[in-house]
Image (spheres, rainbow, N blue to C red):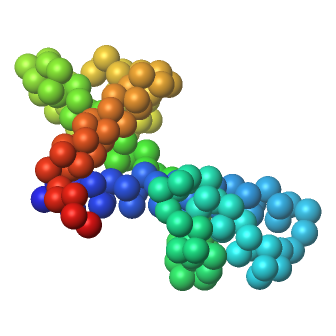
């Protein structure tokens, strides 16, 4: 179960970030010219390297991901909301763990107001400032703890 949770989190946070970085680079360069297939593949490799760091062998990068995923051709920055929402949900859970009694009524208000206000405005009554890096770090801290648990529990014979 922990493996599945971490797999999904890494997919949404690390892989989706690579797609965001790719899209950012393409949109910046497309302002002045058309990009070749080789240039698009190079941008995808660069985005994957920046996102995965040393966590993924460069030989396993998928330079043609920009062809495999139609998301790039829908709306601009289609992928980013997945990462934002995932980290927001984890941060909300961290707030719940910190003070469940205070969290519950504020969360009901957040859900009630969804679609009628910005995420930042919805989070304020919960005592959450989405511009505060500490909130986002609390999300990543929960993931770090889950990774530590996984490393402790997983067999080391792999």
Query: Which one is in front, 67 or 111?
Result: 67
Q: Quadrant of the C terminus?
A: bottom left
Residue closest to the far front:
157
- Residue 2 lies, in percent from the top left, at 17, 54
- Residue 56 lies, in percent from the top left, at 50, 62
Query: Which one is in front, 150 or 26?
Result: 150
Query: Which one is in front, 3 or 103?
Result: 3
Which corner quadrant of the image does residue 89 belong to? top left
Compared to 100, does 87 lie above or below? below
- Residue 26 lies, in percent from the top left, at 74, 63
Which corner quadrant of the image does residue 70 belong to? bottom right
Q: Is residue 77 visible?
A: no
Residue at left offset 21%, top offset 50%: 150
Residue at left offset 91%, top offset 63%: 32
Which corner quadrant of the image does residue 87 belong to? top left
Residue at left offset 69%, top offset 55%: 24
Residue closest to the far right:
32
Residue closest to the far left:
101
Residue at left offset 8%, top offset 19%: 101
Q: Is residue 57 visible?
A: yes
Left or right side of 104 for 15: right
Left or right side of 10 for 6: left
Q: How many marks?
A: 0
- Residue 21 lies, in percent from the top left, at 63, 55
Q: Quadrant of the N terminus?
A: bottom left
């Amino acid at each position: 179960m922990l493996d599945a949770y971490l797999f999904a989190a890494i997919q949404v946070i690390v892989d989706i970030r690579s797609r965001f970085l790719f899209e950012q680079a393409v949109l910046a360069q497309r302002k002045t010219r058309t990009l070749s297939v080789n240039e698009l593949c190079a941008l995808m490799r660069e985005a994957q390297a920046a996102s995965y760091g040393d966590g993924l062998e460069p030989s396993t990068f998928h330079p043609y991901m920009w062809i495999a995923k139609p998301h790039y051709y829908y709306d601009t920055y289609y992928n980013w909301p997945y990462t934002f929402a995932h980290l927001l949900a984890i941060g909300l859970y961290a707030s719940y763990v910190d003070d469940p009694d205070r969290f519950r009524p504020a969360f009901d208000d957040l859900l009630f107001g969804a679609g009628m206000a910005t995420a930042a405005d919805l989070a304020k009554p919960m005592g959450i400032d989405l511009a505060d890096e500490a909130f986002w770090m609390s999300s990543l801290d929960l993931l770090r703890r889950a990774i530590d648990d996984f490393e402790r529990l997983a067999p080391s014979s792999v």
